[in-house]
Structures are given as structure tokens and as C-alpha cells.
Amino acid sequence: MTNMKEIKEVPDIDRNLWLPGNATCAGCGLDLSLRWALKALGPRTVLVTPASCLNVVIGVWPKAAPDFPFINMVFAGGAAAATGIYHGLKARGIEDVNVMTYAGDGGTTDIGIQGLSGAAERGTNIIYVCYDNEAYMNTGIQRSSSTPLGAITTTTYFGKQEHKKNLPAIMAAHNIPYVATASVADPLDLYDKFKKAKDIKGLKYIHIYAPCPPGWKIDSERSIEVAKKAITSGMWILYEVENGVFRLTGKSKRYIDPKKRKPIKDYLTIQGRFRKLTDDDFKELEKYRDSLWRQVNKELSFQELEEK
Amino acid sequence: MSEFEGKRLVKGNFAASYAARAANVQVVTAFPITPQTLVVEKISELVDSGKMNCEFVRMESEHSVMAGLIGASYAGARTFSATSGQGLLYMAEPVHWAAGTRLPIVMTIASRGIAPPWNIWADFSDIVTQRDSGWLMALLSGHQEIYDSVLMAYKISENPDVMLPYMLAYGGFILSHTSKPIHMPKQSLIDEFLPKIPKLGWDHVFLDPDRPIMHGNLIMPNTTPGYQEFRMKIQLAQLKAKPIIREVAKEFKETFGRDYGNGMVQEYKCKDAEFIMINCGILAKQMENVVDFMRSLGHKVGMLRLRTYRPFPTEDIIDAVKHAKIIGVVDRATAFGSPTGGPISSETMAALHNDPQTKDLRVIPFINGIGGRDVVTQQQKRQFEILMECYDKGELVKNEELMSTTYWTGAMGVK
């Protein structure tokens, strides 16, 4: 893993391909994630984004925040358009360009899942990123299938009744060469994952935890704090599945030990969107968190058995 | 001689596949739907056997087919796909995006009726749903025309003054699954006829890290030039396409010897005709025989085949029918709630009304062959007779097929 000292010595690390002064809100997770992703991928990157906040924050025409080729695309077309770009460039003999889709959780876990699944099954050589702010933020905070239980959105007035869809697990079930989760609270881990994805052939899926201050009803300056607490409480787990091998990564490694995990209340109560949680909800979310870790343990112990 | 040159017996769908190959398409994305399937099956076979050099992507839906083609075309590749009916409806959103981005994608449509109830037979109602998307559209009448039109489409679409995608529609099964001999020209002639694919991508959009651009951003309503001007430019390109379509049809005839009228419309004995029927697709071809028969009886009839549907051949129609006593317009499609119920008849009436030469010309709308229902020459003869009777009486002839002001040939009356 790249450490702070090393990252400072990376050539061009100060160059932003995703320019400052774009229209993201203060504390936007998407903004941070994209900046770091592009530092890892470099300028030979083409990006397509389906309907999402990213369509807007790039700047209203003729302003432009991306300093690299960037196209907007229909909501459900993120993965398919990237597929076409990859094959179009390949047909023209251009194969040294990273083709990436950068979609929100709505564009990934809901309306875009079919196209993503198709591209994954075909093994298309693209990077697909879901920046997960856990609701349709661009349209005004409506629930998505990635919204966690209990979160208030403009379409779940008393809090969402269902759990979050586990899309990274669904993507891992596609047997693609690389699936990773990441978080803006661990930028070096995020950077490393994009570095790795860049050199892998096939569909690479990276799911990034990306806080949304206005959507989550948190102060902008607490964006990273919330993202950190998601990790320390064990509600968000950083891992990668490389050619079927599961590995905990970054700041999540130590939380394999349940005793080290902080109470989920620390994470939930600092966010306005969870203000209507009942005691039962807390218990339910704790169970959910534990079930995620049970899956992690299962994966790890299976691998241990196989190694023996 | 290569298997791709000279005379060959092919299904209509295969004519589309062979033409895509001849046009050196670089990316094909596809999803199967009846009756389009054979187009992409053949391309798959050609690509897998090394006889066609292109990227062929088997998509998981039509929506992804078009989103994929858009991506490939953004990247500067020559692209092709094919679909039908429901598939076209499912891809509607990216269909509009393709025109908005001004990408010269070519797609053949084996047209079929829209469900429910399920229908897989010839009916142009599918492309009518995308009529106003900005795509150029042609309604084809034969196997050879399918092949030839794909070649012409790339030349028209990739013209810098046009840069619009092209839909080429022909009736499902009647053309898609029947076999007829077609002539495939020498590849060298085709290569000479077609425009060169630009080395660095299209002039207006490209995905080149050395020349980064952003495309498709949000744009505020009062930014000028802005959204409204971009939309105006699509209409302007449609208008500019008219002379280019005529020019390409002419050049095609000079190069390959095959005649598609002026590209916009094709006249059949219209010059001295008093009664002219506007028709399209394979039924127009069939109607040529009826015109001959009616002429043998002494009736001065003619038929105008509407070949280009978008841009609408307003001037070409006016020019071809202005001397007629009365005209009929036959639709093989529905446009529910429109003035006549038929898309081409409604539009023809509007087009004629605005020109002093034709503003008083009576138009009798017919709708037939919906969902592939048979239309035989006897019925087409009857359509001419109705047209002449309407003229003689100065009013619509009442019969079971007449609903409001439109004759639904071959249909039972409904209540």
C-alpha cells in the first residue's frame, strides 16, 4: 500500500485532471473520490457518466471541470456506452486509454444494473465506478436501493424500511477479475485500488463510499468524519476481490476483530438522515453490520481452508 | 470472385448484413429480436469466421445496443446495428441521444407491429414512434434496396453538413425472411463510393486524451447560443440532408446503375397521371403492377413511392402530384389521434396545404397491411377506384372500411 511519504513523491501527483472550482457542494464525496481516482489513472482516461450529480457538477455549459475527455450519457447507459467507447477506440487501434464509467448509486444499483451486469458478463475491459451517496441526490434526495435502512429521504419520510442492496457482492458473483470497495476517508487505499484496476484486463468494479452533506444532513466539515466512522463502526468495509481472492484492505483490516469496532450509534447519530431511528432500528442495523462481517469471515475462512 | 461480390440469392436481412460488411463498419452491437435476428446472426457468423473485420458486441438489451453504438461512434468508429418493433421502442432514449450528439450511426429496422397483442409482421408503426427523434429515415421496398441503402446511408450520414444517424426500415418477414437475388458490387467500387472514416474521429465530437473535450453538459435555457440553437441545428441538418440525399442517389445510379428515383421519392407513371397514390415499402412495389393494370383499362393513374420519410420530402411530393386531380396516401402504420390516423397521410395533407400549387388538392387517406395483414393487388385496385369515385362524386364514398375520413383497407368495420 502506498503511504503518505511515497504519495508525495509520485510525479504529477499535484496535477488535478478533475479541476478545482467545479460545482460540487462543500464536503462532497464524489468530488474527492474523482480527484483521487484520476491521480491514479492519469490523463489517458476517457470518462462517461450517466445521469447523476456528476452531470451537473462538471459545470453548466460552457464551463468544464474535467481536463480529460468526458461525455454525459443516458441514465441506464453508463456501462454500455463505456463498452462502446472501448470497442470503438480498439477498432481504431487505440488501446492505451482507460475507459471508465463513473455513476451514482441510482445509476448503478437501480436503473443501470442490467447494463453493468451485461458488461461484467462480457468481460469488457472498462473500469466501472459507483460513487455511493446512498440516494438519488441529484434529483433531491430520493431513496435508492443503496439507501440504508432507517435513512430519511424525500421518498422515505419516516426512514427507509429496507436494507441497502449489496452491489459489490453482486458484482463479485459475476466472477470479474477485480471488485473493490473504497472510501473517501481512506484516499490512499482508494488510490491504490485504481492503480491496480488500471493494469487489470476485464471489467473492474469499484464501489466508493461517498458522503453527501446536504443529503445526509451533516455539516460539510464532518463529511470525512462520517466516512471514517462508517469504517470504524464496521458499517462500511474496505476490501477487494482480485481474481476471486478476497482481502480486507486499508483502514478496515483491524475491524475484523469485533471488539475493535466502534458502536454504530457513533456513526448514525451524527447524521440528520438517521434522526428518526428507533431502538429497534439500531438493533436491526447492528444485525445488518454483523451480517456483512459474517460474510467477510466466511470468505476468509473458506480461503484458509482452500489454502490448506 | 469473392462470395461478397456479384449476384447472390439472399434474404432481405442478409442483404443488410452483407452491406454492413461492405461498408467496412468497425463496431456492431446487437440484441436479437424477431424479425431482425438474421441480420446479426449473419454478422456474428462473418465476424467469427474471419470474413468480416469489426468489433461485434452481443449486448444484453436494445437500450445497451444503442448506448454502446453511441459510445463507439463518439470514439470515432463507423457503427451499425439492427432492430425491430419493441426493440426500437426499448432503445428510444439513446436513439434520441444519438441524433442529439449528431453521430452517423446506421441501423436497419425489420419493421413489425407494436404489442399488444403480440405482433411480429410488417408494420412501420415502430419507426413512426421515433419519427421526430432527428434520425434520417428511409422506407425500403426490396432486397437490393436494403443493400444499396446501407451504403448510401453512410455517405449521407457522414456528410459534415448532415451528421445525423440513419434508420432504414423494411417490412418484417415479407422482406426480411424472403430470398431474392441481389447484386453486390466490387469492393473497390464501394470503397471509392464511401467516404473515408476520419483518422482522428469526427470533427465535432471525439474522445482523444490529447484534445480533451466534454460533451452533453447541462445548458441553461437562456444561454445563447444554447439548447434551442442546438435543436435548431438538428432541423437545419435535416433540411440540408435533402439535396445531399438527392445527390447521393444520383451518384449511386451513376456508379452502380441502380435507380431510386431522386432518393427522396420514386415516381411510377406520375408525369401525366390524374390520380396519384402515395405509397411506401413493399406495397408500393406491388402497386406498380396495379398502376399498369389500371392504365391498361384506360385510367390515368400513377404511384409515388415515399422513400425518404425523414426529412419529409415535402417539395418532392408537391412537385410530383401538383398536376393531379386528387391523390391518395396509403399508410402501413398507425398514428393514433392524428388527423387521419395514418402518419404519412396526416403529414402529406399538412405539407400540401402550405403550398399554393397544392393547397386545394384533395387527399384521401388509406391505412392497410397493419401488423402484416395481407394486401392483395385486388385491394390496391379498389383503393384507386375509391380515389376516382371520391373525385367524381366530390365526396367520400361510404363503405365498411371508411372510419371518419380514412379508408382502412382490408379491415372489418369497428364500433
Image (cartoon, coloured by chain):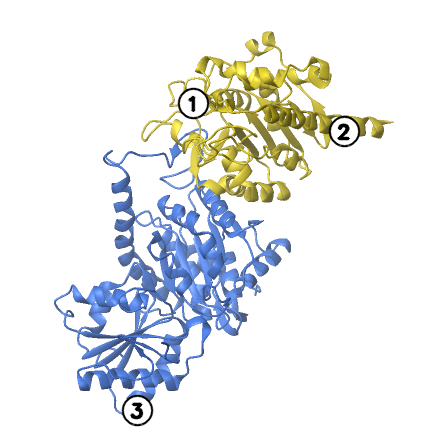
- Type of the residue with mark 1: Pro
Disc number at residue A298?
A: 2
Mark 1 residue crowding within 10 angstroms, few (<14) / some (14–19) / many (20+): some
Report if residue A186 is visible in the image. no
Q: Nearer the viewer, mark 2 or mark 3?
A: 2
Residue displayed at 26% across by 75% down:
B405
Mark 2 residue crowding within 10 angstroms, few (<14) / some (14–19) / many (20+): few
Which chain does tag 3 point to?
B
Colour of chain B as rendered: blue
Percent of width and height locating residue B331: 34, 71
Q: In the image, A158: left or right of B324?
A: right
- Type of the residue with mark 3: Ser
Residue closest to the far front: A279
Helix, strand or loop for disc 2: helix
Disc number at residue A214?
A: 1
Q: Is residue B399 above or below residue B362?
A: below
Residue closest to the far bottom: B297
Residue corresponding to mark 3: B296
Q: Quadrant of residue B367?
A: bottom left
Marked residue nearer the N-terminal end (2 or 1): 1
Which chain does tag 2 point to?
A
